[in-house]
Image (cartoon, coloured by chain):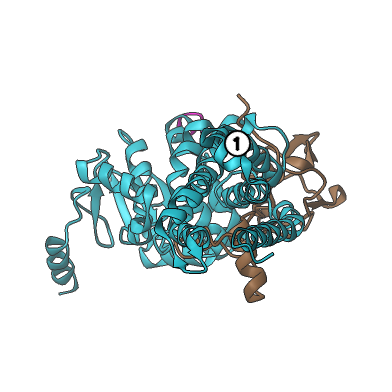
């Protein structure tokens, strides 16, 4: 009766990345394909640029790759579909089991940090799929970055399975298995090459650009404001350079610095980016000709404000890097935030003084 | 390559008591930054400044030889943590990412 119901459910909701089912001693599991469909590629792109990633999930549980037997390896993964997709692609040609944990559609490393890719979740998922019956060996391969949330000793104590922390990247799995579950130093080290930094930039630019309309509105009102009301012409002519500098700041903080990270001097992200902000501001200011340079107050305000804002935006990138620690970021924020607030405050005062003078009140 | 980048020096909270090390090698296995290496069946620290305080080593050291104040090195998470008075946790979402200064 139980089996009938399971089969019915299976027939109804066959995920597109599967190719049939496989009967194990305990139940029937989906066999997953190692090939990516067009939808998988499109999903990867969408999850790299926006909120689509928040619900990009696969069902937790046990899956089969190829023709696994009682002696085949078990690879643990998160239920963020992109993580799962990368794993199944790299397992091509192997016969293995994949155990997907419920990490609320978050990747292995972040989920381990948040506590959803955890010792507890692993142990209960192993019990739920009756892993001790499905395989006769007692080893389970957990991605290395999952070690932040998984205590190998506790798993062994409670289940009898020995945890092997596999390579950082799924693409090294075949060579890791071939070498007898031994990692080279390279396989266990996380790097952060330019291409990895580049794919992260859309998620830096998007949140920054969401705030841009507020900034633009503020600038246009400030420059347009006259004793007689808001003048559109003044708003545009006075505000344009500031809007351009604002866009430039986002570009420097959310794109240029992440991509050029190791080539910008200093280790502090705040200083790195302040330098980049200064350079890009210097590149943009001359484009506005003598108009902007005549007015000393707005000019000083822009030199104060924009590099500081670039610096602030670039600090956000610490959340995406593979090498910044909490103590370091706390130190940067402790020094940085008061400076950012002062820079913004002083710039605003300078602009208000400029407006008052423009109106001839002083 | 320049892709094994280092962050600020002398800030990590990583503590290692080598006298407690039993030489199991788990720290070398889990550290993604190459902070440890085994020398004469005992873990040795190569360079503490490589540490990013992820906490994998302390979580997997069964002998209490390692401790670290683990957490996310993420400005948005730390700011949110300061504002709400809670520990910084990574939101990894649109709502918290980019809650800039």
- Residue at 65%, 39% in the rendered image: A278
Residue B28 lies, with reference to residue B53, above or below; the image says above
Image location of residue A246, percent across then percent down: 52, 48
Q: Note whether A174 is above or below A228 in the view shown.
A: above
Q: Quadrant of residue B41?
A: top right
Span highlighted in magenta in the image? A176-180
Residue shown at the point (41%, 52%) measured from the top left: A136
Is A244 in the magenta? Answer: no
Subunit ID for the residue under disc 1? A
A353 horizontally vs A286: left or right: right
Q: Looking at the picture, does residue B25 appear above or below residue A213?
A: above
At x 66%, y 35%, the residue is B5
**Quadrant where the C terminus of chain A lies?**
bottom right
Percent coordinates x, y for residue B71 in the rendering: 66, 59
Q: Which colour denotes chain B?
A: brown
Q: Quadrant of residue B8?
A: top right
Q: Colour of chain A?
A: cyan
**Which residue was labeled with disc 1?**
A189
Residue A242 place in picture, x, y as percent: 53, 49
- Magenta region, main secondary structure: helix
């Amino acid at each position: 009766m139980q089996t009938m119901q399971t089969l019915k459910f299976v027939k109804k909701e066959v995920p597109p990345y599967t190719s049939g089912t496989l009967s194990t001693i305990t139940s029937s599991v989906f066999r997953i394909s190692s090939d990516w469909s067009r939808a998988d590629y499109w999903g990867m792109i969408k999850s790299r640029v926006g909120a689509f990633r928040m619900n990009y999930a696969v069902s937790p549980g046990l899956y089969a790759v190829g023709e696994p037997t009682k002696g085949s390896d078990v690879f643990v993964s998160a239920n963020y579909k992109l993580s799962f997709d990368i794993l199944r692609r790299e397992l091509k040609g192997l016969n293995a089991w994949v155990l997907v944990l419920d990490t609320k559609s978050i990747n292995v490393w972040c989920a381990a940090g948040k506590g959803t890719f955890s010792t507890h979740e692993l142990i209960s998922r192993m019990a739920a799929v009756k892993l001790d019956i499905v395989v006769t060996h007692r080893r389970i391969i957990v991605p290395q970055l999952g070690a932040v949330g998984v205590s190998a000793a506790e798993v062994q104590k409670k289940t009898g399975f020995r945890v092997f922390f596999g390579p950082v990247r799924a693409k090294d799995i075949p060579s890791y298995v071939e070498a007898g579950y031994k990692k080279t130093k390279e396989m266990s080290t996380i790097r952060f090459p330019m291409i990895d930094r580049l794919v992260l930039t859309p998620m830096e630019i998007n949140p920054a650009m969401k705030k841009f309309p507020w900034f633009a509105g503020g600038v246009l009102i400030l420059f347009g404001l006259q004793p007689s009301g808001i003048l559109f012409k003044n708003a545009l002519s006075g505000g344009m350079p500031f809007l351009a500098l604002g866009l430039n700041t986002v570009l420097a903080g959310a794109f240029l610095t992440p991509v050029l990270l190791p080539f910008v001097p200093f280790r502090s992200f705040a200083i790195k980016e302040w330098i980049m902000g200064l350079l890009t501001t210097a590149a943009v200011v001359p484009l506005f000709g003598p108009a902007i340079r005549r007015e000393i107050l707005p000019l000083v305000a822009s030199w104060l404000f924009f590099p500081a804002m670039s610096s602030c935006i670039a600090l956000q990138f610490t959340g995406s890097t593979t090498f910044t620690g909490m103590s370091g970021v706390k130190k940067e924020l402790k020094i940085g935030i008061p400076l950012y607030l002062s820079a913004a405050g002083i710039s605003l005062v300078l602009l208000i003084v400029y407006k008052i003078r423009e109106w001839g009140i002083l | 390559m320049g892709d094994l980048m280092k962050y600020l020096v002398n800030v990590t909270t990583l503590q290692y008591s080598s006298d407690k090390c039993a030489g199991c090698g788990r720290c070398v296995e889990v550290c993604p930054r190459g902070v440890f290496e085994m020398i004469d069946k005992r873990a040795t620290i190569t360079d503490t400044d490589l540490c990013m305080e992820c906490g994998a080593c302390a979580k997997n050291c069964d002998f209490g030889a390692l401790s670290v104040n683990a957490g996310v090195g993420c400005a948005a998470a730390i700011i949110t943590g300061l504002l709400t008075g809670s520990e910084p946790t990574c939101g990894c979402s649109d709502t918290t990412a980019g809650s800039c200064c």
